[in-house]
Amino acid sequence: MVLQKVRSAMGVPSAETPIADRDLVEAAAPPRLARRRMVQGSPARANGWPFVIPAIMLLLLLNIFPLVFSVVMSFSNVSTDNGLHLASATLANWSQLLHSGDFWASMKFTVFLVVVAVTGEFVIGLGMALLLWRKIPGGGFFRVLFTIPMMLAPVAVGFMFRMLLNEQYGPIDSVLKSIGLPKVLWLSDTTAAPFSVVVMDIWQWTPLMFLLLLAGLQAMPEDAIEAARIDGASGLRILWDVILPMLAPISVMAVFLRMVLAFTIFGEIYLLTGGGPGTSTTSTTLLAYFQGFQTFNISYGSTISLALLIFVTVIAVIYLSVTRVLLHKVRT
């Protein structure tokens, strides 16, 4: 009798309950039990597919079709005379790619940009996040101020840095001249121009790293840090042995996200240097644009884009495999 009362209070009908009363009990059942019955019956799952299929088809249309079309063009010779015509070229485009000095130069610059810029963004972003981790006067204002560069359009960032680094009337060279320092050829020297692109990228995308790392710091439990302080650990020791290991998962994700995005840089370089002087700042995406839309060698431009996609995929797989092992060691 007691068990029957408990089952009735929980909304679970018993075998002795009449059918009419059992329907009333099920109607008054808690939402958790009702959801369980709905999932077990699975009509909701089956009826939900018509609403999901259009979104899946749209994603496939926007992503898979351009990729397949690029693969087809990379193994073809594209002619734009009287419409778009494809003629078989087998591996001619890929052979040209592997023997192209411009392609390997663009890959060298792209890898240089990704390594130096992402490293600088992580170090500076971590410093900014540690600075605003604790409550300081005006902390909210500085958080908003630090995120402004990330909100600007790439075209605006490239044009702004082109004005700042202008070698004739740019304000930076004017300041250097006023304090007795020599003028720097920021955009016309093959050594200085790549670093100008790196500085621009760091200025624009450090806020993204700052926001991700700050979110990780704010979600970090205070117990471990307080225990380290009680044990007499210094600030640098706490940072190295406690904060950075606990921040490792969000750091891996932030670096991965920024690394993949940095490989696709285009608009900022196009506005700042146009790929020059010479080809010293020509990224792989910029080279693909020049080949596909300036010389109208669409098949070779597609081959360059696919080669970059394959390279980034391999780098991403290696990065995730290595960081997975490192994260496992950090946890243990």
Image: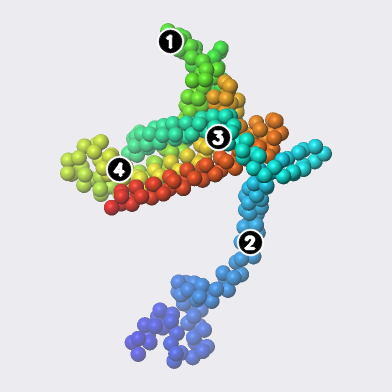
Identify the element where label 1 is drawn: loop
State the CA–CA distance, disc 1 to disc 3: 32 Å
| Residue tagged 1 | 181
Marked residue nearer the N-terminal end (1 or 2): 2
Q: Residues within 10 Å of mark 4 (few under 14, many from 20)?
A: some
Residue drawn at 48 percent across, 78 percent down: 28
* Cα separation between marks 4 and 2: 44 Å
**Which mark's residue is nearer the viewer, 3 or 2?**
3
Q: Residue at x 51, y 36 (%)?
A: 262
Q: Would you place residue 204 above or below residue 84 in this image?
A: above
Instruction: Determine which of the numbered discs, if any, sits on residue 265 in the image.
Output: 3
Residue 7 visible (yes or no)? yes
Residue 155 image point, x, y percent: 59, 30
Amino acid type, callout 1:
Leu
The residue nearer to you, when weighing 68 against 134, is 68
Residue at image mark 4? 243
Q: Which residue is mark 2?
A: 53
- Establish if 104 lies above or below 222: above
Classify mark 1: residues with Cα within 10 Å, few (<14), some (14-19) or many (20+).
few
> Of marks 3 and 4, which one's residue comes earlier in the chain?
4
CB under 8 Å between callouts 3 and 2? no
